[in-house]
Amino acid sequence: GEKHRLSAEIERIVQGHLKYKYEDVSDGWDLIHQEGEMKVYRREVEENGLVLDPMKIFHTIKGVTGHEICHYFWEFQYRMEWETTLDSTKIIEVLDPQTVVFYQVHKRVWPAAQRDSCFWSHIRSFTSSDEDQPTWLVVNYTTSHLLAPIKSPQVRIVANVALICETVINEPPLNPKDIKRENIECKLTYVAFVNPGGWVPSAALRSVAKREYPRFLKRFSSYVLEQTRDKPILF
Ligand SMILES: O=S(=O)(CCO)c1ccc(-c2ccc(C3CCCC3)c([C@@H]3C[C@@H]3c3ccccn3)c2)cc1
């Protein structure tokens, strides 16, 4: 598609996530939460007293495709229907049909100061040779923008988040047209590198993250299930 000022950075960040995705979580990652198909891993990383803990979540959602998951995660108009941790979100620039810049104000997490964020958000699919279903992904990556000035007392977070989804078709019927929702499932990997941008008590931030990431992914997954239940499958 058309190149723009962020094209090179987007390519670099997307390729980085795809390389990381296959990195196994055995060394250095702690399994901090398991709930059904969801496995939540965290690496404990601090930088001069600031908690930067990368998060990695694996989840399998039966009855939806990776395209549907990425569609509802990326498309702006659904965000406030599933995102319960935001006070506001708005698109401030559209760079191409797969890339927008949005500005968000996050709900205050006491005792921390209120956070805001400005991301480019990019959605894309690609088919590796051996897979029959394309992989879909969304990356949200912090970017500065004239229409999102940093103004006190809000603290700007720095984040690099990816949602990478594969679609599995179990017992595929002979004719692909006969595929039903009970034959499909989405295997997703969610990674989040969030720098809170300013000091937050380590223990508080760790317990917020441990509670909020699984809640966020659970709520988002059920939202997509209810939105797609009676709709034709979007492969
Ligand atoms: O997946 S996304 O791209 C969806 C975009 O809407 C995304 C999700 C979460 C965040 C995020 C931003 C700020 C904070 C903290 C930092 C200090 C005070 C607030 C947290 C902490 C980890 C906890 C958290 C986890 C999940 C959801 C909300 N809260 C998370 C950013 C982006």
Image (cartoon, rainbow, N blue to C red):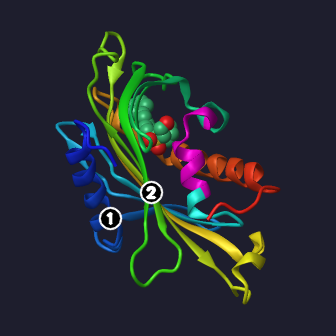
Q: Which mark is residue 138?
A: none
Rendered residue at 55%/34% (across/down): 76
Judged from this view, the residue extending furthest toward the front is 2
Query: Which residue is identified by label 1?
Result: 18
Kind of residue indicated by mark 2:
Leu
View quadrant of ligand 1: top left
Q: What range of the chain is rendered magenta?
A: 68-78
Residue 52 screen position, x and y as percent: 29, 43
Looking at this view, name the residue that lies furthest to the top: 152
Quarter occupied by the C terminus: bottom right
Q: Amino acid at mark 1?
A: Leu
Image check: 107 left or right of 64?
A: left
Q: Position of residue 2 (x, y in %)?
A: 31, 44
Identify the residue at the far left of this view.
48
Residue 196 screen position, x and y as percent:
33, 33
Residue at left offset 22%, top offset 36%: 5
Report which residue position mark 2 lands on. Answer: 137
Element carrying mark 1: helix
In this image, 54 relative to 166: left or right? left
Q: Which residue is the extreme one toward the right?
A: 230
